[in-house]
Image (cartoon, rainbow, N blue to C red):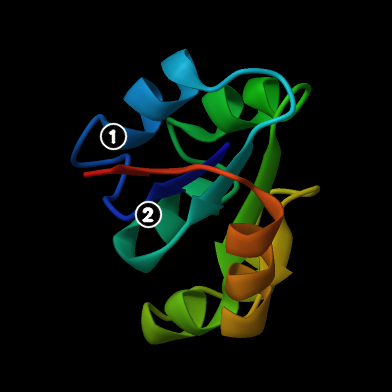
């Protein structure tokens, strides 16, 4: 399953809820304000790094840029993709769950 998170984990618990329900082999795509969950050195970074053992993480490059987040601040192992990559992920996974 592909999980999409569009809310900042520093303001809401959407990412945390997502990770509690995501199973091994799932993917999480951080979009819009959800991209803050991809940043190194935040209070939520270790939660994401732990989840990366079983779950693939992706973040949308244009959403990072729109928020002034340099790609060097993204947690190692999170794949930075564009909108074409988003379409590829949606096609790869048979189900998508949006966490609002």
- SS type, badge 2: helix
Left/right of residue 38 with respect to residue 34 in the rendered view: right
Task: Tell me the quadrant of the picture where the C terminus can be found.
Answer: top left
Mark 2 and 1 residues: CB-CB less than 8 Å, in contact? yes
Q: What is the crowding at mark 1: few (fewer than 14 residues within 10 Å), some, or many (at least 20)?
A: many
Measured as percent of width and height from the top left, residue 72 is found at: 70, 68
Seen in the picture, residue 48 relative to 3 is either above or below; the reply is: above
| Residue 64 left/right relative to 53 | left
Query: In which quadrant of the rendered image does the N terminus lie?
Result: top right
> Gap between marks 2 and 1, in whole Å?
9 Å
Q: Which residue is drawn at 51% across and 42% down?
A: 95
Tell me the quarter of the picture where residue 56 sits.
top right
For mark 1, give the secondary structure. Answer: helix
Residue shown at 60% from the left, 73% from the top = 87
Task: Check residue 34 in the rendering and tell me which mark sits there, or answer none.
Answer: 2
Q: Name the residue under label 1.
A: 14
Q: Of the residues under marks 2 and 1, which one precedes in the sequence?
A: 1
Q: Is residue 46 left or right of residue 37?
A: right
Camera-side residue: 21 or 13? 21
What residue appears at the point 40 percent right and 28 percent down from the top-left corner? 18
User: How far across and how far down the image is residue 26, in percent?
Assistant: 65, 32
78 lies above or below 83: above
Q: How crowded is mark 2: few (under 14 residues within 10 Å), some or many (20 or more)?
A: many
């Amino acid at each position: 399953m592909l999980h999409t998170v569009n809310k900042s984990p520093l303001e809401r618990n959407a990412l945390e809820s997502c990770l509690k329900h995501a199973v091994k082999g799932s993917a999480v795509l951080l979009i819009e304000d959800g991209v803050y969950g991809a940043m190194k050195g935040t209070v939520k970074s270790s939660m994401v790094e732990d989840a990366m053992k079983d779950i693939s993480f992706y973040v949308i490059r244009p959403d990072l840029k729109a928020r002034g987040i340099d790609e060097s601040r993204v947690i190692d192992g999170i794949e930075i993709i564009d909108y074409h990559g988003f379409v590829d992920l949606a096609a790869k996974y048979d189900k998508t769950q949006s966490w609002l």
